[in-house]
Amino acid sequence: MKTTSVFVAVAAVAVTASVALAQTNVYSRNAVGAVRVDVPPAGQFVLAGFNFKAIGGDDATFSALFGTNQLVKNTLNTKATRIYLWDPAKGGGGGYWIFFQKPDGQFYNRDASTIPTNPVIRIGEGFWVQSPNDATTNTSIFIMGEVVSTQQFDRVTPNGFFMIGNPYASPLDLNGTNLTWMADGAFGHNLASQADNVYIFNGVGYDRYFLKTDGKWYVALSPFPLATNAVIPVGSGAWYKAKNVFTNKLVRPYPWW
């Protein structure tokens, strides 16, 4: 099972900043944050999320996000840390692009392992991190970036499965007041199989929720109660399964001045 922790440092021109795991308040401008993600050994996985934007930009390249000293590097992908990005269009039905870092510090696609590449992770995107197959202990990586300050973040959610995190440096409560799922075009139904679903990774499996016609998320297990803790933690990710394409409008959950 993975664990995460969060800290926020202040840029040179910033005032005091503070973010802690399971808290939602950010009290500064120009804050730079980092999430620690612990990856279990022996080829196990963690579903992580990018809760920031790139320092000085928006989406982050692998080299900017992971650097050259965080991941296990090897010329063989099975002996290196692997990053999995989901592509809903791959193969006509969705699939993973799998990347690893060689000792030269550059990243390579597992399926084209002689050509260096530098993929991008988008704000609020989820991705898998897999430890080397022969790893014997937990390893930690830090995901760093600028805290997102925009009042609203619009995320296009495609039809079918899509990996998500929170674009903001806070836990994402599916039933939070900063989200308007039905108004945005998400599909609700009183049957879980007919509604949009979210699968939140809990370290060993998934907690599944579905959207009803009242715009609230419910546990997808009988007796299907209203979800009171449908939260994607900071640094973590989830799967969204959409019935239709829509634009998810997330309102910033913390003050900014």
Image (cartoon, rainbow, N blue to C red):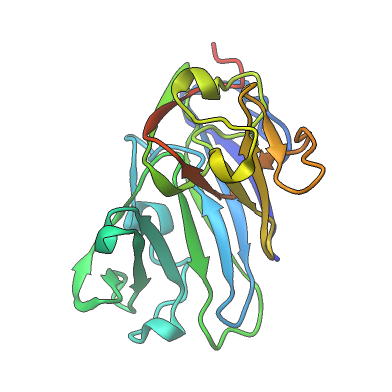
Image quarter of residue 172: top right
Residue furthest out toward the top: 257
Residue 234 in view in this figure: no
Image quarter where the N terminus lies is bottom right
In this view, the residue in front, 218 or 171, is 218
User: In the rendering, at what x and y percent does residue 234 appear?
Assistant: 62, 43
Residue 53 is drawn in which quadrant? Answer: top left
Please, which residue is most extreme toward the left here?
Answer: 115
Name above or below for residue 20 compared with residue 106: above
Provide residue 38's location: percent of width, then percent of height: 63, 63
Would residue 161 be seen by someone viewing this image from the given angle?
A: yes
Q: Position of residue 214 (x, y in %)?
A: 65, 21
Question: Foreground residue, 182 or 235?
Answer: 182
Image quadrant of residue 56? top left
Name above or below for residue 200 compared with residue 149.
below
Q: What is the tally of numbered marks visible in this picture?
A: 0
Residue positioned 60% across, 15% down in the render: 255
Direction from residue 32 to residue 210 in the image, left or right: right
Residue 163: where, in percent of width, then height? 46, 49
Closer-to-camera residue (186/112): 186
**Residue sitting at x 36%, y 86%:** 76
**Split into 4 quadrants, where in the image is the C terminus?**
top right
Residue beneath the point at 57% across and 34% down: 169
